[in-house]
Amino acid sequence: MLNWTDLWSPIRLSLELATITTVLLLIIGTPIAWWLARSRVWWREAVAAIVAMPLVLPPTVLGFYLLLAFGPHGPGGVIASLFGARTLAFTFTGLMIASVLYSMPFVVQPIRNAFEAAIYDFVETQRWAEAHFLAAGLVVFAFAVITAMMVLEKRIGRSGS
């Protein structure tokens, strides 16, 4: 007979993965999106193409190369060995990194589009109400991300000790 503990374990794992991935995507993806929107270097679109690759690659191709990278002979395995592990493949950390890489285009592209249109154009055309609305939204967003990170850090710290 299936009990509550058996049911809760995969649900908890999914919730933890989704929460941590979302926070990491916002922390990593937002600066990348801002840089892509504001930078004028010639290789900017090459970076944008790399970020967008998971959209066009079959999941099996991405998964295959992540397994190689996270395996004992890949860079992930080398990093894992520094912490006493043999590999990052099939670990929660490896799953988290793969989730962030796979989801990155879904965060970077919309945020980049917002940065390209966002606040700068409103200020330039003296549309102060719209600029204020977007700026305030970004302040609230930043506050929410920082608060979520602090709460998550405390919960992880509590559950780890």
Image: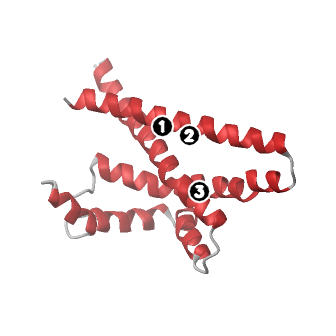
Badge number at residue 142: 2
Q: What separation in Å lies between label 3 and label 2 (alpha carbons)? A: 16 Å
Q: What separation in Å lies between label 2 and label 1 (alpha carbons)? A: 6 Å
Identified by mark 1, the residue type is: Ile
Residue ID at (33%, 29%): 154
Q: Position of residue 81 (x, y in %)?
A: 15, 60
- Tell me how the rendering is colored: secondary structure
Q: Position of residue 59 (x, y in %)?
A: 47, 61
Regarding residue 2, the answer to whether it shows in the image is no
Identified by mark 3, the residue type is: Val
Badge number at residue 108: 3
Q: Nearer the viewer, residue 60 or 112?
A: 112
Compared with 137, 87 (above or below) is below
Give the quadrant of residue 124. bottom right
Identified by mark 2, the residue type is: Ala
Compared with 102, 16 (above or below) is above
Q: Position of residue 118 (x, y in %)?
A: 74, 52
Compared with 10, 87 (above or below) is below
Q: Nearer the viewer, mark 3 or mark 2?
A: 2
Q: Which residue is mark 1?
A: 146
Q: Nearer the viewer, mark 3 or mark 1?
A: 1
Residue ID at (65%, 65%): 38
